[in-house]
Image (spheres, rainbow, N blue to C red):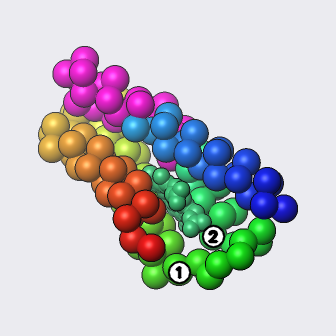
Amino acid sequence: MEILRNVVLLVHLTGFAILFGAWVVEAVAKRYQATRLMDVGLLIAGVAGLALAAPWGLDHELNYVKIGVKLVVLIVIGGLIGASTSRARKGTPMPAGVFWLIGALTLLNAALALLWR
Ligand code: HEM
């Protein structure tokens, strides 16, 4: 059970890596726009995160306040990516500030996961 939980955690981290990696690629290329790949990473991190939010294969209590905050942050990131990709399709891209906010909120969720015990 513990091994299975660690596999789900690996999937969760892979989603985070895809989301943040895709964001870094756009930042380095100075395009400052959200992409479909960010959506894919967010979806993987979100689904695996919800599976990890259930108390199975654990020898400690989960911090549900932290998990709730992470879920809200994830929903906000999803909204920003969705708005950004649809506006780009219509030819009226979002300001670069929205792109930086997506990266900052992604890092915030990783920081919450690791620093809030
Ligand atoms: C962009 C979104 C997210 C990022 C970047 C992220 C990042 C991380 C990271 C880096 C870890 C590893 C922490 C560790 O090893 O202790 C982690 C663990 C975890 N995440 Fe997320 N996460 C995100 C979204 C979510 C969501 C939406 C949920 C649940 C609704 C969630 C639930 C969890 C749980 C339950 C763990 C395991 C923590 C533990 O067992 O104490 N995550 N997350």
Which residues are the magenta region? 21-43
Q: Quadrant of residue 13?
A: top right
Viewer-proximal residue among 32 and 62:
62
Asked if the beta carbon under badge 2 is closer than 8 A to the nearest atom of ligand 1, the reply is yes
- Residue 56 forms part of the magenta stretch: no
Mark 2 residue crowding within 10 angstroms, few (<14) / some (14–19) / many (20+): some
Please name the residue shown 69% across and 63% down the image.
51
Residue 48 versus residue 10 in the image, above or below: below
User: Which amino acid type is shown beneath numbered disc 1?
Assistant: Tyr
Does the magenta portion include 34?
A: yes
- Visible in this render: residue 69? yes
- Which image quadrant is residue 103 in? top left
Would you call the spot at circle 1 few (<14 residues within 10 Å), some (14-19), or many (20 or more)? few
- Relative image position of residue 50 (x, y in whole percent): 63, 64
Query: Do residues under tags 2 and 1 come within 8 Å of each other at their CB atoms?
Result: yes
Residue, far right: 1
Q: Secondary structure at mark 2?
A: loop
Question: Camera-side residue: 81 or 71?
Answer: 71
67 left or right of 97 in image = right
Q: Earlier in the sequence, mark 2 or mark 1?
A: 2
The residue tagged 1 is 64
Q: Is residue 49 left or right of residue 70?
A: right
Q: In the image, what residue occupies the spot 52% across and 79% down?
A: 63
Q: Which residue is mark 2?
A: 53
